[in-house]
Every structure is written in structure tokens, then in C-alpha cells.
Amino acid sequence: MVLPHEPEFQQAYDELVSALEDSTLFSEHPEYKKVIPVVSVPERIIQFRVSWENDKGEIEVNNGFRVQFNSALGPYKGGLRFHPSVNLSILKFLGFEQIFKNALTGLSMGGGKGGCDFNPKGRSDAEIRRFCVAFMRQLARYIGQDTDVPAGDIGVGGREIGFLFGAYKQMQNNWSGILTGKGLNWGGSLIRPEATGYGVVYYVEKMIEKATKGKESFKGKRVAISGSGNVAQYAALKVIELGGTVVSLSDSKGSIISQNGITAEQVAEIADAKIKFKSLEEIVGGSTKAFSGSNSVEYLAGVRPWTKVGQVDVALPSATQNEVSGEEAKVLVDAGCKYIAEGSNMGSTKEAIDVFEANRNNDVWYAPGKAANCGGVAVSGLEMAQNSQRVTWSREEVDEKLKDIMYTCFDNCYETAVKYAAEKNAGGLPSLLKGANIAGFIKVADSMFDHGDVF
């Protein structure tokens, strides 16, 4: 498949296919080859106009999408993204990744993704509410708790989920769990905001344990994190809780570096300010106690953190796709980085992944987003289960289930990588990139055979 007009989707497709081909899967089970051309085409793509009224009384028009990619394992499940960069290539790549990510959680969820090229930054609450109502007016007929259950993503947080849910409820006269990431008062799950960030740290915890035969943990590790949104914030807090030192965070305008470690208090202040769409430059440049005196940090405009953090043990790309280049990957490896796990979807370029994979014999271990960041959608699945049962689980219950899902996901990726390695007993760490892709693919493919989607 060659789709030059869809580069992001092409990259995701190539990653999956190359991982499958560079293993023994097709030689042991040649029937799986026929699944690829079927699973790589969405079951349905919905595109619609979103016309809405801004505060000046003017009509604005945006392009809305929902890619319902694969329902072999359950209802379509995946986020909604509101960002000017949204297009079909990005949503197809995200939806394609979501199929196999959801499979790795072990829960009954298919894969999908959606969104709009609307930019919520600089908009009033009233404008965002009117936009969400207009967006849901078009989307409502295509979703449902047993059909398609969207969630949040970039630009879609608790406020937007609330407006979208309220619009659906009014239009359909139906209270059901058709969105996840809901407020705790009306069907949301504890730990859902924290889930992706916590989950990626739990996954890396198992990587460190396995690689060092239980001799090391996050304690004393220097951890570089990109992003400063939901995923990065909670990953940072969990790393700090486990005894690691967070040396960086970033946003689209620049990075903050702290060799002594970013504090939990600083993360909390960033979280509060990011709700108001403030940049890191504005946050750290203010006269707040959290960023003054011995707690001051270095702000670097226009750069990502990877080449600026010095010696690090762990890197967690947690901002957006393709945020680690091949050159940056080399710098990270030279700086002693041993563990790279994506909190963002497809956070590393192909060139970066090649660098990480080429250094597995040097104890460098890379985990792709479809495995490492599946904690968010895992707890979305737990939220769906709670909604269906009309129950609410405690914070401890949900966190324990999340941890178990991430640990099981790691074990599945590891064991699958070992089982289908093209070169048996070649030495070095097994490829979690291949393990994640193969394990997710097999589960989806088997269901597609059972349903007669492939024969």
C-alpha cells in the first residue's frame, strides 16, 4: 500500500507491516498475510461540516471527521482531537494505531478516531460550547455505547467532553456511556485523567525490572519528558512518586529544563495554567513561588528537550507524533538513555526508531505508543464497564486494574517478541516494537477470521 497523500498513515502502516514481515509470523502462519489489506482499510469514514456561531455573531465552518476503523474486538473506541492540524491522514494513522493498542489492553474495544480542525485556543467557553453542540449534532447519529464510544484527545478535555455529552443527551433523549473521560459526578471513572501518564510509567517500570533482573527501579533515574499536557503531567508525578528525577517538560513553543528535578508543586501549577492555555514561557516567567529561587528552571524557546537535558536514563515522549528525530535519538543514546517509551502516539520518527532498535544489544530498549500508552484507553474501557453496570469503583480498584493491564501488556509484548523473533538467540533485548505489533495484530486477525471478515 502506497499513499503519498497520507504520510502519517503510511508511516503507521509501514511500521506494522515491517514488524510482521521481519519476524517468523508469516512463515509459521502464512494465512495471516491476507488480513493486512483488509485491516488497513477503515470500515467506515464519516466526514461532515460543522457550522457554528462565534461570539461576534459570525458563522464559522470547520471540517469534522470520524474514522471507524475496525470493530472486530468491540465497539469503535478512540479519541476526538480538536486541532488545526487535523486531517484524514492523521486521523487514519491514529485510528489504525488504536486498533492494535486497544487489542493489547485485553478489553473488548475496536479502533477508531475522530476530530475537527477547530482550534479551541483563544475561544471563550460559550464559543466552545456552541461548537461542541454543532459538532455533536453531526456525530450523534453515528455513535452509541454498543457502536462507537469516543473519548478526549488533544484539545478535548473534561470541559469539551461535558459539552459534547450534554448535547448528545438532549438530542437523543438518552443517558448512556457514549463518551469516556466524563466527570466523576456523571459516570466518569476515577484515575481516568491520570491513566495514560501513570500507565506509561508502569510499563517502563516493568522494562527496567526485566532488563536489570529486578536490581533497579525508577529510584534515582533521570527522566526526560516532553509535553506538558495531561499525559506528561501525570507521568511526571508518577516518576517523582517512584523516586525518579524529572529533568524536562515542553510545549509547542519551547522546553523547561531542571537538572535538580521538576517538583510536584511545579507540575500542579503547570496543570492549572494549561487549562487556561498559558504557555510554559508565561508560566515560568511569572513571579510565582513554585518557579523562584532554588526552584527556578531554565526555559529554552523553540526547542525540544532531547538534546538539552544532558545525561538521562529514561525518555518519555508525551506531546505529539514524530517528536523525536533520528539525530535527537542518537543524542539520547549517547547521553546514556536506556529506556524510551512513548506517551504520545507514534512519538518517534522511523529514523529515531531505527536508532533505538539498532542499539538493543547495547541495552537500549524502545516501547512504541500502541503498547506504552494504552493505559488511557484501558481505563476508558473500565469506565465503559462501570457505566454498563451502573457502579463506581474506588481509586485504588481502578489503579490496581490499570497497573495489572500495563504489566500484562508488557509481558504479552515481551513474550511475543521472543516467540516470533526472526533471529533466535541473537542476544540483546527482544524488540518490544515487534512484540507489540505482532501481539495486537494476531488478536485482531483471529477475530476477523472468526467473523468471516477474512476467509
Image (spheres, rainbow, N blue to C red):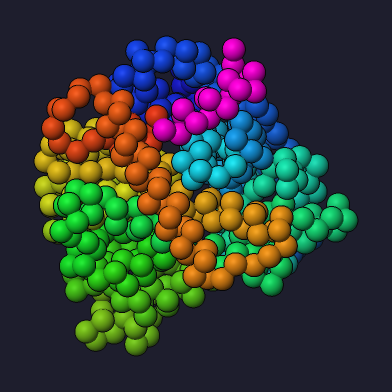
Q: Is residue 352 visible?
A: yes
| Identity of the residue drawn at 26% across and 79% down | 296
**Front one among 269 and 180:** 180
Q: Which residues are magenta?
A: 439-455
Question: Dividing the picture into quarters, in which one does residue 123 lie?
Answer: bottom right
Q: Is residue 450 magenta?
A: yes
Question: Dividing the picture into quarters, in which one does residue 232 lie?
Answer: bottom left
Chief SS of the magenta region: helix
Quadrant location of the C terminus in the rendered image: top right
**Front one among 431 and 354:** 431
Q: Position of residue 25 (x, y in %)?
A: 36, 20
Is 87 situated left or right of 320 in this image?
Answer: right
| Identity of the residue drawn at 36% across and 57% down | 202
Say above or below: 299 vs 71.
below
Q: Position of residue 215 (x, y in %)?
A: 15, 58
Q: Position of residue 226 (x, y in %)?
A: 34, 57
| Identity of the residue drawn at 49% across and 70% down | 396
| Identity of the residue drawn at 59% across and 16% down | 454
Question: Dividing the picture into quarters, in which one does residue 369 lie?
Answer: top left
